[in-house]
Image: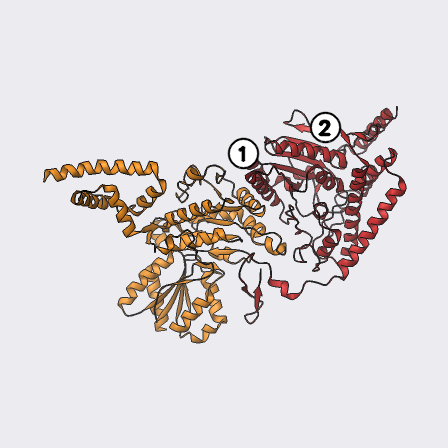
Chain colours: A red, B orange
Amino acid sequence: VRFFKNVLMSLLQGCFCLFKNPVKTVILRNIITIYNNDFSILICDLHRLDEGPSVQTVLTREDGLRYYRTMQTMRRMELKADQLYKQKIIRGFCHLYDGQEACAVGIEAGISPTDHLITAYRSHGYTYTRGVSVKEIMAELTGRSGGVAKGKGGSMHMYAKNFYGGNGIVGAQVPLGAGVALACQYQGKNEVCVTLYGDGAANQGQIFESFNMAALWKLPCIFICENNKYGMGTSVERASASTDYYKRGDYIPGLRVDGMDVLSVREATRFAADYCRSGKGPILMELQTYRYHGHSMSDPGVSYRTREEIQEIRSKSDPITMLKDCMISRNMASLEEIKDIDATVRKEIEEAAQFATSDPEPPLEDLCKHIFYNDAPLEVRGTHPWMRLKSIS
Amino acid sequence: MYMYYGITMVFFTVFWVCHIYIYINNMTLFIFYHVSYQNVTPFLCIIIALHSVEYHVLPCDICIINCILLLQVTVRDALNQAMDEELERDERVFLLGEEVAQYDGAYKVSRGLWKKYGDKRIIDTPITEMGFAGIAVGAAMAGLRPICEFMTFNFSMQAIDQVINSAAKTYYMSAGRQSVPIVFRGPNGASAGVAAQHSQCFAAWYGHCPGLKVVSPWSAEDARGLLKSAIRDDNPVVFLENELMYGVPFEMSEESQSKDFLIPIGKAKIERQGNHITVVSHSRMVSLCLDAAAVLAKEGIECEVINMRTIRPLDAEAIETSVMKTNHLITVEGGWPQFGVGGEILARIMEGPAFNYLDAPAVRVTGVDIPMPYAKILEDNSVPQIKDIIFSVKKTLNA
């Protein structure tokens, strides 16, 4: 009976949304059944695929708590970055990921650490899931020597093992990701490369060039479009002639997934990774998700969308709240445990922020370092002819 | 008498049979000796015929002996040999570009490589420069060592974002975590009759960017040694060849035939010693400078011709040392004058110790500041000619 009640509630909510905003796309929510740790997830929309990811999945308590903790850490980290930016301790670009946590966590849960990942500039979340500590991320944002790129990269240029950034040029990371997939295929280690881009980048020509070569050479590349409805200030309807981003790969099979549900993302990623590893070639995934902040810190985010819309998503589809409610309602975790995790995370972020504000900036000697790898010291011209600097690898 | 004619006829048949035999059985040897005779086959056939008749030896052996004595290699074959050897030496090296595999290369530079190494190492790409350049950079980031060929560097403009933002800057932005060992190569600069969109020189454009090494070989030896160094270098290298130089043969020293023959990137070479004026050039223009120097020598003017070999990092020291000896300087390049290679050299001389040794202002000889026209008379007058170099030298010396 509760099952049917849930279904009815979800449908009613869905209808209500449609009624209020007939034009906007309704974010699909998962329908949860009530047996133990088995979860049912929504069937994905498929393109050129006979069957999609499994609709049944198992969530263990440890996994659940881990996903919760990771998402909460990401959320708090981004909010802290927001704070530091407003205090002018972080400068330049800062593109925040809050609201989209389920994508990063779900993808990481669906692949292994030996697989590869590359994304665009909204990359703090992925930097974390790929193994960089919050301390190093925040210190990089504040431009200190303790940062993951020693303060030389900034928000958009953080790298880790099997994580190729953080890329500033919209769409340029997609051919790079296809190239990493080529290397995976060449080296024969059965690894895949997850290549992410946004709804704004989805119209870039170089992405279609990458689709062509990936399909031609059957590269093990999972192309993922994180559709958060807005490319900077332009909504998807105003930017794309076709907003079915999962079909834009044409000859590449695609699936559209609820990006606010970490389990849906996980299952879809597992499915996609298996597809690629079996040598069938590339696959395309569209994750329907949402960002609470504007495009970057210089964008308040309310000139092209309503506060009501943001509030609605926050109350109905927030990935962290959804996971928490799920787990508590099934007695997989108690409220106290969750509160403990929240407190630990808050403390961790505070310490990281403390480190990031107190760590010294990189020394001036670092100015000309890292121009070339494995090279003899090189003379570098300074701002005037009498300033002769040296570059050491 | 008639017997000898008869034997010559038999020779030609035997010659071509042996030719084909060697072609089928040993591609390298075929290329090697075919190479040497590219431009002079008809005459040498006759020489071989006469020799073989005289010495009663198989024509093939004479060919081989003649090869070893002459050892002339074209720039195209030097590049081919360099790539072949590097592909063999390191499994991570691979070549991708338009028409590099089954077509044997748009300019036949990668001839025979696909037959030898197959689809995995020599990859034909669709006509999507931005895409395949990005793919090459991504592969380099993930541990391979790609050679990305642009059919001409004019098309690299489509992919220039990947070369600069994804390849050149990454090692610095990542503070040393992520290196990009890639070579971008292809013909650069003016060709013959290909008009405005296919004739631009990119030395200045790429030479402007930190994080890149930019190399511009002239001779076959330069091509071989510098390409090997570029492929073995762990950083992004832009390798600017020249289409008009591909077919030009050069004598190669025995040392340069070694599989580990490397020319260091960043060092210029003095091609001709002189006392009166320093002439600095790169790529095809070095040939013109040497020709001009030969003409000037007859009038008693000794030019010191420097072949830059590398655009970035520029070997300013070699140029300064030479200027301090000769007291006069001109630079010669095929590219446009504004913000070009010559401009950079002159600025460095101004700012460096050599300025005080100049007896006359240093000048640049460059291509005309216009898009390249098509008509032959216009095209010929759009790039420096020998007479322009001679005129500039004399003007500088008499200033």
Q: Which residue is mark 1?
A: A216
Q: Nearer the viewer, residue A123 or A106?
A: A106
Between the C-alphas of marks 2 and 1, the distance is 28 Å
Mark nearer the N terminus (2 vs 1): 2
* Residue pictured at 23% horizontal, 42% vertical: B59
Q: Which mark is residue A54?
A: 2
Q: Mark 1, chain letter?
A: A
In the image, what residue type sits under mark 1?
Leu
Is disc 2 placed on a helix, strand or loop?
Answer: loop
Residue B38 location, quadrant = top left
Please name the amino acid that badge 2 sits on: Ser
Does the image show residue B81?
yes
Q: Is residue B296 left or right of residue A16?
A: left
In this rendering, the answer to whether B220 lies above or below B399 is above
Q: Position of residue B261 (x, y in %)?
A: 42, 54
Image vertical order of residue A45 relative to residue B90, above or below: above
